[in-house]
Each structure stands twice: as C-alpha cells, then as structure tokens.
Image (cartoon, helix red, strand yellow):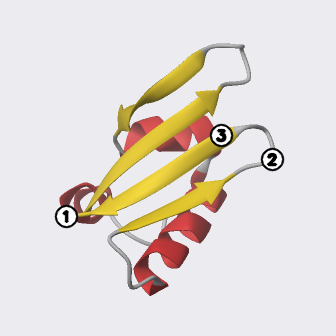
Amino acid sequence: MKRSSKYINANYRIKVYGVLENGEKINSLVGVSGIIAIIGVDFLNKFLDRAENSMQDSTTCKLRRGIKVTFYAK
C-alpha cells in the first residue's frame, strides 16, 4: 500500500454498496482491512489516488462487478 492504514482511516470514511461475489448484499462503512478484503490493494491504491486528486467532499468509484465504493473526506 502507498499509504498507511492509520492515514486512510484518519482522513476518509469508506462506504461500500453492492453485491459481493458470494451473493451477499452490502451497504455499510468499512475500514481499510474491510475494503482490502473486498476489492484488493491495487484497486484501493487506484481509488485513493482518485479521491485525493478530487476537489470534492466525496468521490465515488464503481467496479464492473456491481460494487460502488465512496470515499468521504473528513
């Protein structure tokens, strides 16, 4: 990971919405370990770069498999 878990949890709230691979529906806030379990480290780094370059309070990133990840700046 490019950034530490402490930095990410201190600066962002991460909400995940959609259907997971096992068919389970999710709509909740997760921490760094939860988002890594769902999308992996590569996508997390890519989405965090997008969220930090954005000048908005929230950044939404969508995956083709039906998962939507929203980063809310604190």
Picture quarter with the C terminus: bottom left
For mark 2, what is the residue? 64
Is 39 displayed left or right of 9 in the figure?
A: right
Residue type marked 1: Lys
Marks 2/3: CA–CA distance: 7 Å
Is 33 displayed left or right of 19 in the figure?
A: left
Q: Can you tell which mark lies on residue 74?
A: 1
Residue type marked 2: Arg
Residue nearest the observer in this picture, 60 or 8:
60
First in residue order: circle 3 vs circle 1: 3
Question: Dot 3, crowdedness within 10 Å: few (<14), some or many (≥20)?
Answer: some
Q: Secondary structure at mark 3?
A: strand
Location of residue 45 in the rendering, given as x and y in whole percent from the top left corner: 55, 66
Give the residue displayed 62% in from the left and 47% down from the top: 40
> Height in image: 45 above or below 35?
below
Give the residue displayed 44% in from the left and 35% down from the top: 34
For mark 3, what is the residue? 67
> Height in image: 22 above or below 6?
above
Q: Quadrant of residue 4?
A: bottom left
Is 19 displayed left or right of 7 in the figure?
A: right
Location of residue 66 in the rendering, given as x and y in whole percent from the top left corner: 73, 37
**Number of numbered discs on residues:** 3
Marks 1/2: CA–CA distance: 27 Å
Location of residue 3 in the rendering, given as x and y in whole percent from the top left corner: 38, 70
> Height in image: 8 above or below 39?
below
Q: Secondary structure at mark 1?
A: loop
Residue type marked 3: Ile
Is 56 displayed left or right of 17 in the figure?
A: left
> Height in image: 28 above or below 52?
above
First in residue order: circle 1 vs circle 2: 2
Location of residue 39 in the rendering, given as x and y in whole percent from the top left corner: 62, 44
